[in-house]
Structure formats: structure tokens, C-alpha cells
């Protein structure tokens, strides 16, 4: 239930905060005062598309906050799963800057729009004349009927959904076994080719890295030989080489090597001499074994191309290619021994299909039984709403069994006795659709998830006794869920438990709308204004308003 709504810098509203009751909340105000802004604000904080045109002129940021209590259990579970604190209230906050950036918080935690929509999906049910579009969409009629049936329909649908999943799994297993004989033989040939191609390559782990290293070395052989030769020349293959100079230096110091201040230098020179000699021997070995081999280079290059091609086909590494080989061998073995498995899967699928058809048939029978009840209830509601002579029926058409059963359902309607019943979209007027929507809302009480229903001028275009009946229906709905209603109809407004007045004024060239709770004589005056149709109300209208409020 929505307990409070705070709006800042949204359209004509600068700052307004209203508290709502858990019953029938009526929003009053002259045309153009900004009543619909409250609905825009509520839609925005619940996750509607952020529209920068709603930002109040001259302001940099708009903000809407909504507080809900008596939050449904499924929303508490979502909050828990998201690790968002919940202490009995749900606080939603959403801002929008002039640059289009938006910040959303749920109980203080910053969330993304997708998460906000997940949390608020069933918080509020919006109903206006435009919402009758969902009622005329035949794709929604089956789900409406199933919600009307309630738990029994959901139990059947759960069973049917599980059976459809089971059939899907069986079909996947059959596909993995190659499907029919033609497909199976085709797949076996493909697998044999793949296995043979990989096995002929005789891949080993780490081979590719070794080949790349060897390829790089052979490619550089000529350069290596040249540089190593030059190094050897400087170290040991010329008169003034490093080795000969070190030998001469240490020889000059040998006779003085017993002196402490020369001993260390002598030892270091001797160690350097033998270290360089060892380096020379290693480089000579490198020089002897470094030959540019074009044939070997081409062989390695071809091998690397083969490995690259296999990786492109079967995996992004040699290890993945070998894993593919093992899997292909297993699949080929399964295919070669698949006849019995296929027979068993086919029998299992036939059995599950029969069970699915049986459950769908039972659900269909249940739907047809409840459809008669729904028809009766809708006709009674429409009669109460002064739509006598109308007809409403739930038509059934069969279809292939699936996750929704085997029924296609369509609501048909006739506004006048003796006329052919047709699709709602083809025969019902806007006012008739509004009353149909109200009838369904009344019938579906307790069967929907929302604890708050917003009616946006659903009583538009009606008057007299019909308006009285609409008022009674709205009042009845408010006994079960919180109702927020924008209305211009006096008798509807008079049924309210809480009254919110939206006013608009211009001050110093600035237009501001403001929403506030009104009571007592202020309520009488506003309802009288609806009766008289102006600001200056007659005493007769005031007396009539009091009578309506006291009924």
C-alpha cells in the first residue's frame, strides 16, 4: 500500500508531499490543475521511462519518493535476494537531472532501472481508459481467465510446464542421438571425418609452443651465426682478444698474489679468465650447431598452419582440440549404439505427450467450467453498471498442446440485445470498455497481486444512475485494496475516505501546482464545485454535496 508520495520539481509541481489512506483516496481539482502529474510522478518512481520534459522549467533536478507499507511477500523475497535492508517499509527514490542522468534508490541502496522494475512490477495496478487496451487484446484473455480461476489453474499450468520441459529434454536427447536414420548417418560421417582429421595430426600438449620457439630460432640462424662469430673473435680469436688480455693481466700479478691488497684482484682476474673461457666454449658450440635449414623451417611452418587450422575448427587451444576429439569419439560411440536408446526415448516421449494431453484436457474442462461463472459475473457487473441488454461470452478454440494448455480464448461482446457478439475491439465504445474494465477489476478482487489500484478518470463520460453504480464499485474495491482515483464525478468523489486537492496558481509569472490533503468544509466545497461546474458554488450545490458525503 502506498502510504506517502513526495514530489519535487516535476512538471508544474515544485514541492508537494501527500499521505494516503488504505481505503478510497480521491484526487480532486479543476481541469488543468495538474492531477495527472501525480500519476506521472508515481509512474516515474515505479520505473517508467525517464522523460526530461517532465523536469520543471528552470530546475536542474526532479525527485520523487514513494513509501509503501504492507509490502507483498514476493517483494520482500526480492529485497532479501538483493541484500537490501527491509524494516517494514519500502522507500523508493528516483531523481532525474537536466543532463538525463538518473539515480534510483531502494531503501537507500542504489539500484539500476531493471532492478527497480523487478521490485515494483506488482506494487500498483494502473487503470484508465487507455488501460482498456489490455482488455481488448485477445492475447491477454487466457491469462485473465486463468487468474480468475486461481490456484487450481496454476497447479495444472505448473504440471503442464514441467511436462513441456520434459518433452524438450527428450527432444534434445533425440537430437544428440542424430534424430532419424538419415540425420544420424549424416552426423556419424561428420564425426568420423573430424576424428580422423584430428588423430592424423597426432597433436601433443605443449608442441605448438616448442615449434614456435624453434621456428623463431631457425629464422634467426644466419643473424645468430654472424653475431656469435663476431663475439668469439673479440673474446678469443684475435691477438688482442679479451681472453689473451685477461691471461696477460693475471700473469703479471701472479708473483705478487701473496700480498693482501693484490690477492683479491688476482683471484677476481683469474675467475674472470676462466668464466670467459667457459663462455667462449659455449658460444663455439652454438656456432657449430647454428645452421639455417630452409627445409626444417618450412616443415615447422606447415605444422603450425595445421595446428592453427585445427584450433579454428575445434577449439582455441590444442587442449580444447583434444577435448573435442574425446567428445566426438563418445558421441560416435553413442550413435553407433543408439537404436535401442532412440526407441526408449521415442516411447518415453509418446508417454509424456499422452500425459500432457490428459493434463491439458483437464485444464480445458476447468477453464470452460469457470468461463461460465465468469460470464455470469461479468453480466451481473455490467447490469449493475447500467449496461442492460449487453452480452458477454468467453469463446474457446482448440490449438496444439503447449505450456499454456490447448486452448485459445477470446472475449466477445454485444452492447445491445439482438446484435451479434464480436471482438471487444470491434464493438465496445470507450465508455463501455471503461465499465468492462471496472467490472473485471471488481470480479478479480483477491486474485491480483497489486495492493494498490489507480483509477485515472475511469468514470469519464458517465453520469446519473450509472455514475452512482460506478461509485459503488470503486468503493467496494477499496474495501479489499487501496484505491487512488482521479475523478470529475461528484457521486464518485463523495465515496472517498481521503481527499487530495490539486490546485494551480500563477505568482510573479511562475505557474505552480500543489497537492494537499483536505478535510471537512473544504471537501464539501470541492464536491459542490464538481456539481456546479465552477469556483463559485451555489448553496444548493453545497447542500447536495453534503447529502452525497453523508450517504
Image: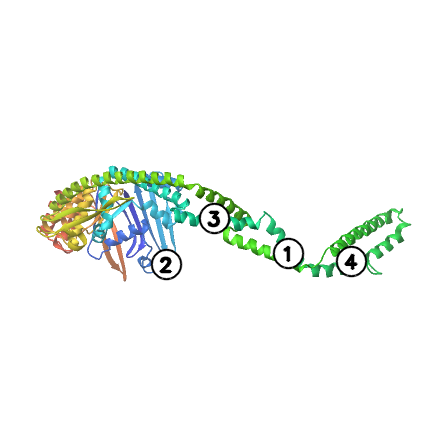
In the image shown, does 540 or 20 lie closer to the viewer? 20
Find residue 340 and report its horizontal and vertical position in percent.
40, 39
> What residue sits 86% from the left and 52% below the top?
250
| Model colouring | rainbow
Find residue 320 and report its horizontal and vertical position in percent.
52, 48
Q: Residue furthest right?
A: 255
Determine whether 53 is above or below 491 in the image.
Answer: below
Query: Label 3 belongs to which residue?
Result: 191
The mark nearer the N terminus, 2 or 1, is 2
Q: Report, in whole angstroms, how far the alpha carbon at label 4 lies from the one at label 2.
A: 75 Å
Quadrant into which the C terminus falls: top left
Q: Report, in whole angstroms, how far the alpha carbon at label 2 lies from the one at label 3.
A: 60 Å
Q: Quadrant of residue 358?
A: top left
Give yes or no for contact between labels 1 and 3 (Cβ–Cβ under 8 Å).
Answer: no
Find residue 330 and report its horizontal and vertical position in percent.
48, 42
The mark nearer the N terminus, 4 or 3, is 3
Query: Label 2 belongs to which residue?
Result: 98
Using the rendered image of the protein, determine whether residue 37 is visible from the camera's viewpoint. Answer: yes
4 vs 3, front mark: 3
In the image shown, does 124 or 511 lie closer to the viewer? 124
> What residue sits 78% from the left and 58% below the top?
232
Quadrant into which the N terminus falls: top left
Using the rendered image of the protein, determine whether residue 521 is visible from the camera's viewpoint. Answer: no
Q: Quadrant of residue 174?
A: top left
**Mark number displayed over residue 215:** 1
Callout 1: SS: helix
Amino acid at each position: 500500500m502506498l502510504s506517502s508520495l513526495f514530489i519535487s520539481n516535476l512538471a508544474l509541481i515544485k514541492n508537494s508531499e501527500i499521505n494516503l489512506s488504505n481505503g478510497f483516496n480521491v484526487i480532486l481539482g479543476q481541469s488543468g490543475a495538474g492531477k495527472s502529474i501525480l500519476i506521472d510522478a508515481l509512474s516515474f518512481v515505479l520505473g517508467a521511462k525517464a522523460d526530461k520534459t517532465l523536469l520543471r522549467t528552470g530546475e536542474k533536478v526532479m525527485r520523487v519518493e514513494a513509501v509503501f507499507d504492507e509490502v507483498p511477500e514476493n517483494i520482500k523475497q526480492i529485497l532479501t535476494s538483493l541484500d537490501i535492508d527491509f524494516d517494514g517499509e519500502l522507500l523508493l527514490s528516483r531523481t532525474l537531472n537536466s543532463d538525463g542522468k538518473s539515480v534510483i534508490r531502494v531503501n537507500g541502496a542504489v539500484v539500476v532501472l531493471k532492478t527497480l522494475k523487478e521490485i515494483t512490477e506488482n506494487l500498483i495496478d494502473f487503470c484508465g481508459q487507455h488501460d482498456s487496451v489490455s482488455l481488448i487484446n485477445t492475447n491477454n484473455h487466457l491469462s485473465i481467465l486463468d487468474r480468475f480461476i486461481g490456484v487450481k489453474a496454476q497447479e495444472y499450468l505448473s504440471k503442464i510446464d514441467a511436462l513441456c520441459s520434459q518433452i524438450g529434454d527428450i527432444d534434445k536427447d533425440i537430437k544428440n542421438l542424430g534424430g532419424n536414420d538419415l540425420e544420424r548417418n549424416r552426423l556419424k560421417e561428420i564425426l568420423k571425418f573430424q576424428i580422423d582429421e584430428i588423430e592424423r595430426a597426432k597433436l601433443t600438449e605443449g608442441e605448438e609452443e616448442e615449434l614456435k620457439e624453434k621456428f623463431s630460432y631457425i629464422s634467426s640462424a644466419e643473424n645468430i651465426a654472424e653475431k656469435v662469430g663476431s663475439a668469439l673473435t673479440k673474446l678469443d680469436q684475435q691477438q688482442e682478444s679479451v681472453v689473451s688480455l685477461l691471461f696477460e693481466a693475471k700473469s703479471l700479478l701472479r708473483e705478487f698474489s701473496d700480498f693482501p691488497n693484490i690477492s683479491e684482484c688476482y683471484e677476481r682476474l683469474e675467475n674472470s679468465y676462466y668464466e670467459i673461457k667457459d663462455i667462449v666454449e659455449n658460444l663455439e658450440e652454438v656456432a657449430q650447431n647454428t645452421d639455417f635449414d630452409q627445409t626444417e623451417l618450412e616443415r615447422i611452418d606447415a605444422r603450425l598452419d595445421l595446428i592453427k587450422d585445427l584450433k579454428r575448427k575445434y577449439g582455441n587451444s590444442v587442449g580444447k582440440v583434444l577435448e573435442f576429439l574425446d567428445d566426438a569419439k563418445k558421441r560416435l560411440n553413442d550413435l553407433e549404439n543408439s537404436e535401442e536408446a532412440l526407441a526408449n526415448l521415442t516411447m518415453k516421449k509418446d508417454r509424456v505427450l499422452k500425459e500432457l494431453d490428459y493434463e491439458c484436457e483437464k485444464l480445458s474442462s476447468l477453464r470452460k467450467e469457470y468461463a461460465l461463472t465468469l460470464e455470469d459475473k461479468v453480466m451481473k457487473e455490467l447490469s449493475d453498471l447500467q449496461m442492460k441488454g449487453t452480452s458477454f461470452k468467453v469463446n474457446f478454440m482448440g490449438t496444439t498442446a503447449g505450456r499454456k494448455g490447448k486452448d485459445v480464448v477470446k472475449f466477445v461482446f454485444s452492447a445491445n440485445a439482438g446484435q451479434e457478439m464480436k471482438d471487444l475491439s470491434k464493438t465496445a465504445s470507450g465508455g463501455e470498455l471503461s465499465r468492462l474494465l471496472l467490472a473485471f477489476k471488481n470480479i478479480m478482487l483477491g486474485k491480483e497481486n497489486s495492493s494498490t489500484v489507480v483509477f485515472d478518470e475511469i468514470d469519464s463520460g458517465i453520469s446519473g444512475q450509472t455514475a452512482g453504480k460506478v461509485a459503488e464499485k470503486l468503493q467496494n474495491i477499496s474495501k479489499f485494496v487501496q484505491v487512488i482515483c482521479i475523478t470529475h464525478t461528484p457521486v464518485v468523489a463523495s465515496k472517498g475516505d481521503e481527499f487530495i486537492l490539486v490546485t494551480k496558481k500563477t505568482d510573479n509569472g511562475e505557474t505552480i501546482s500543489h497537492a494537499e490533503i483536505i478535510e471537512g468544509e473544504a471537501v464539501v466545497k470541492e464536491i459542490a464545485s464538481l456539481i456546479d461546474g465552477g469556483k463559485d458554488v451555489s448553496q444548493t450545490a453545497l447542500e447536495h454535496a453534503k447529502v452525497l458525503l453523508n450517504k
